[in-house]
Image (tube, helix red, strand yellow):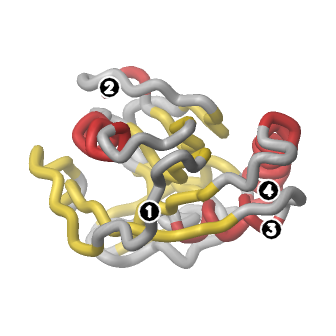
């Protein structure tokens, strides 16, 4: 892996495709064990979590369903501070075992605002599976049940994460060059 340019910024390799794949398989195995016989509903948060959700579900061996919602809080390289629901949930989660699939938690605001809305719909259980967590940036603590990687508070692209719309298609994750 070598450094790449996305728009006007340079990014250096951070997590290889194989490293991500191995960790996603580990998380899937944990979920398979914890949810055996429960038929969980995975809810992927678009746009960023589409790759993580897809790869995670490839390794889920128990009966499971998936749906998607679209929440947004980023503009450029920073959180806007506002969480916007662009596409809402179209399934009933009452008495269902629900696992939210999120690409990244940095400030925590998106899930901090969204999870109470889901709790109000009375799921049997509500857990989170997160690809990346930036503990140093977290202002709104969120319970993370399945976390692939904790990373420093640096901007990243690739594997579903973008910089102004570009970089989502990269199979690895790159960090903004200092």
| Disc sitting over residue 58 in the figure | 3
Residue mark closest to the camera, 4 vs 1: 1
Query: What is the CA distance from the residue labelled 3 to the residue labelled 4?
Result: 11 Å
Please indicate, yes or no, whether residue 47 appears anywhere in the rendered image.
no
- Give the Cα separation between the discs numbered 4 and 2: 25 Å
Neighbour tally class for label 4: few under 14, some 14-19, many 20 plus, Cα within 10 Å: some
Relative height, residue 81 to residue 174 (above, below): above
- Name the secondary structure under disc 3: helix
How far apart in space, not on screen, are marks 4 and 1 (Cα)?
Answer: 31 Å
- Between discs 4 and 1, the one toward the N terminus: 4
Of callouts 1 and 3, the N-terminal one: 3
Q: Which residue is mark 2?
A: 138
Q: Are marks 2 and 3 in contact (CB under 8 Å)?
A: no
Q: Which residue is mark 1?
A: 92
For the residues labelled 1 and 2, the Cα–Cα distance comes to 30 Å
* The one of 166 and 177 positioned closer to us in this rendering: 166
Of 27 and 62, nearer the camera is: 62
Q: Earlier in the sequence, mark 1 or mark 2?
A: 1
The label nearer to you, 1 versus 2, is: 1
Q: Is residue 63 left or right of residue 170?
A: right
Place residue 116 in its image quadrant.
Answer: top left
Q: How many neighbours does mark 1 have within 10 angstroms: few (below 14), some (14-19), or many (20 or more)?
A: few
Question: From where the camera sits, is residue 32 visible?
Answer: yes
Point out residue 176 in the picture as x, y percentages from the top left corner: 41, 50
Can you identify the residue that label 4 sits on?
A: 21
């Amino acid at each position: 892996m070598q450094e790449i340019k996305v728009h006007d910024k340079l990014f250096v390799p951070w997590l290889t495709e194989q490293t991500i794949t191995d960790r996603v398989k580990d998380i899937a195995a944990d979920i398979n064990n914890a949810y055996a016989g429960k038929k969980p509903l995975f809810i992927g948060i678009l746009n960023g979590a589409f790759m993580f959700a897809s790869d995670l579900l490839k390794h889920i061996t128990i009966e499971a369903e998936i749906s998607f919602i679209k929440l947004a809080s980023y503009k450029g390289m920073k959180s806007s501070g506002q969480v916007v629901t662009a596409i809402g949930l179209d399934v009933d989660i009452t008495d269902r075992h629900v696992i939210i699939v999120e690409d990244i938690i940095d400030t925590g605001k998106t899930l901090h605002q969204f999870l109470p809305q889901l709790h109000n719909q009375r799921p049997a259980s509500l857990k989170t599976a997160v690809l990346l967590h930036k503990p140093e940036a977290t202002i709104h603590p969120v319970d993370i049940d399945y976390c692939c990687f904790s990373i420093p508070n640096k901007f990243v692209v690739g594997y579903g994460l973008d910089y102004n719309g570009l970089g989502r298609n990269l199979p690895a994750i790159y960090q903004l060059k200092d």
